[in-house]
Image (cartoon, rainbow, N blue to C red):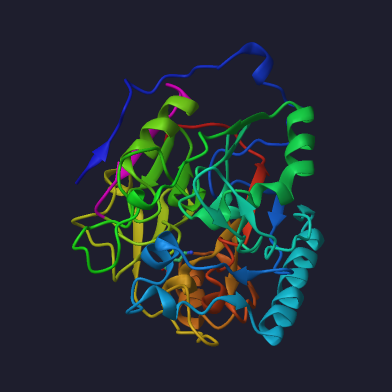
Amino acid sequence: MSSTPFRGPVAARTHHPEETTTASLVRVHNEWDPLEEMIVGRIEGAQVPAPDRGLWAIEYPELPSIEQIPIGPFPRRVVDETIEDLDLLAEALEKLGVRVRRPDVCDHATPFRTPDWESSGLSNYCPRDLLLAVGETIIEAPMTLRARQYESVSYRSLLMEYFESGARWLCAPRPRLLDSVYRLPGSGARFAIDESEPLFDAANVLRVGRNILYQVSDTGNHLGARWLQRALGSGYRVHALDNLYDSAHIDTTLTLVRPGLVVANAARVSRENLPPLFRSWDVVYFKDVVDTGYVGHPISSVWLGVNFFMVNPHLAIVDRRQTALIRELARHRVDVLPLLLRHARTLGGGFHCVTLDVRRRGELDSY
Ligand code: ABU
C-alpha cells in the first residue's frame, strides 16, 4: 500500500483569520453531508479537440494512431439528449432544495495559443474534473490535457461570486504541457504523464474530511499531490494512492456513501489495495455494473455505472439502469433517486463527474 502523506501529523489549522467565514458560498468537507449548492455541467458547444500527444495518451490510448481520434463535435442527438438529461438533473436537485449553478455556454471550437502550442477546447460537461472544492477553498486544477487549460473561463463569474462571498480561490500553477510531458501509448511507461511539473485533474480527488484521497494515475502525478498538500496546509493529509487505477479519475473506482460505508469497484479494488483509511469501514465490493453503451467511440469504461453522488447520507442519485447497484444500496438503507444520463460513456462522465458540490452542511472531521 502506498499511502504517502507529504506533511506532518494532521492538526487543526486555519490558513488566515480572514479566510474562515460562515458567509463563504464554498464550504464542503466530504462527499455525503447534506447538499446545499451544486454546479451542474453543460454539453452545449462540446467537441473532441484537434488531436495532440496528450489527448491520445490519456483519452484514446487504445487507438493504434493519433490520426484515428474522432475529432469534431459530438452527434446532434447525443448533445440534445444530454441537454435534456442535465436539465432534469438540475430540476431534481432544485426540488430537493439544492441551489443549482451552471457554467456559461461556450464554443469550445475557438482555438487558443500558449507560447508552446495551440489547441481548442473540449466541453463544460464535467465540472468535477476541473474544479476542486475543499473546505472554503476552490481550486482550478492543473489539468492534464492541453484542451482543458482554459475551461475554467466558463466558470469565471461563479468563481468571482464565490471569492466575493469569502471563499479562498486558488489556481494551481498553469502547466506548460510540452510534448515531453506525455508518454505515448506503446512506450511501456506506466502512466501517460511524467513528473516534470505538478499535474492533476480535480476528479483524481475524494474528500473524507481532513483526509484527502488522491489517485496517482494518467491524470495526476506525485508532484500534483505535493502541490495540493502544500496548498491545503497541515490541517489536511493528502494520501497519494498509486495502486488503485492507472487511467483517468478516482470516481469510477471508489464512491463514498457516508462515514463508514464505501462502494468499491471490485474490478479494481480488493482488500489488498483498499486505502487503509477504509479498513474499519463497510466496503461494498461491487461487480454487477450494467454497460449502458455508447455512440461512436467511448471515452470511459462501463464503470461510470458506479459514478454516483450523495445528496445526503441517506439519498443517492444513481443512473436508473444500474439496478444491481440500486438494490445493493437499498440493502445498506440508502434511498436512490434514479435518473438518466443516456450518453455518459460517450461523453466520459456519470453523475459524479457532471456535478461539483460546492457547499454541504456539516463540520470538518477526521474520520
Ligand atoms: N471520467 C472518468 C472515467 C473513468 C473510467 O473510464 O473508468
Q: Is 248 on the left-hand or right-hand side of 17?
A: left
Q: Is 100 on the left-hand or right-hand side of 255?
A: right
Q: Residue at x 48, y 36 (%)?
A: 209
Is 35 situated above or below 228?
A: below
Q: Is residue 312 visible?
A: no
Q: Is 310 on the left-hand or right-hand side of 229?
A: right
Q: Residue at x 43, y 25 (%)?
A: 230
Q: Is 75 on the left-hand or right-hand side of 309?
A: right
Q: Is residue 288 magenta?
A: no
| Residue lying furthest top | 17
Query: Which residue is at the front of the view, 158 or 211?
Result: 158
Residue 313 locus on image (x, y percent): 57, 53
Is 142 situated above or below 40?
A: above
| Image quadrant in which you'd find residue 321 | bottom right
Q: Give the quadrant of the C terminus.
A: top left
Q: Is residue 10 visible?
A: yes
User: Which span of residues is magenta-colored?
Assistant: 233-243
Residue 36 locus on image (x, y percent): 72, 47
Q: Residue at x 75, y 60 (%)?
A: 106
Q: How many marks?
A: 0
Is 339 situated above or below 236?
A: below
Query: Which residue is at the front of the view, 200 or 236?
Result: 200
Q: Residue at x 51, y 82 (%)?
A: 323
> In the image, ligand 1 is in what quadrant?
bottom left
| Residue lying furthest front | 115
Residue 266 locus on image (x, y percent): 30, 69
